[in-house]
Image (tube, rainbow, N blue to C red):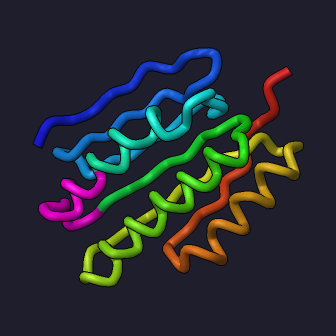
Amino acid sequence: MENLVIKATEQTAEVVLDATNGKIEFSGVSIPEDSYSFFTPILRWIEQYIEKPQKKTVASFNIMYCNTSSSMYISEILRKLRKLKNSGNEIEINWYYEEEDDDMRLLGEDFKRISQLNFKIIATPSIV
């Protein structure tokens, strides 16, 4: 299975989907004008990955800001990753937020509660 790397833009996060090492990484801002076009290849990749996953998958979200449609797609990604957990694979989710950004911390806590996955919410120093 091929890895998928999407470079960051002013409106979209950098995405690294690494099947060899079982890593799923999002970083930056996620406010795409066309969320469907941005997230569809990511969801397809995850569906293929679920068919032949690594024993452990680590998904890291280091998102500075995301819009409502991005939140809905992140929720869908977590739902797909829960399938891995339910089939006996180890899943670890790392949700990073700037230590003074209560909105992103609360969003991470919501995703943790809803997803029922092994979820770490990690504060990082604020960027000034």
Looking at the image, is 120 positioned above or below residue 123?
below
Say left or right for 97 vs 54. Answer: right
Q: Residue at x 64, y 66 (%)?
A: 111
- Where in the figure is residue 56, as x and y percent of width and height? 28, 64
What count of labels does the image hold?
0
Say left or right for 63 vs 88. Answer: right
Looking at the image, is 70 positioned above or below residue 32?
below
Image quadrant assignment for residue 5: top left
Looking at the image, is 70 positioned above or below residue 126?
below
Say left or right for 91 vs 103. Answer: left
Q: Residue at x 33, y 75 (%)?
A: 83
Residue 47 magenta-highlighted? yes
Quarter of the image with the N terminus in it:
top left
Say left or right for 20 vs 44. Answer: left
Q: Residue at x 14, y 36 (%)?
A: 2
Residue 40 magenta-highlighted? no
Q: Which residues are magenta?
A: 46-56
Question: Closer to the camera, 26 or 48?
Answer: 48
Image quadrant assignment for residue 3: top left
- Where in the figure is residue 127, as x and y percent of width and height? 79, 25
- Where in the figure is residue 121, as x and y percent of width and height? 66, 59
Quarter of the image with the C terminus in it:
top right
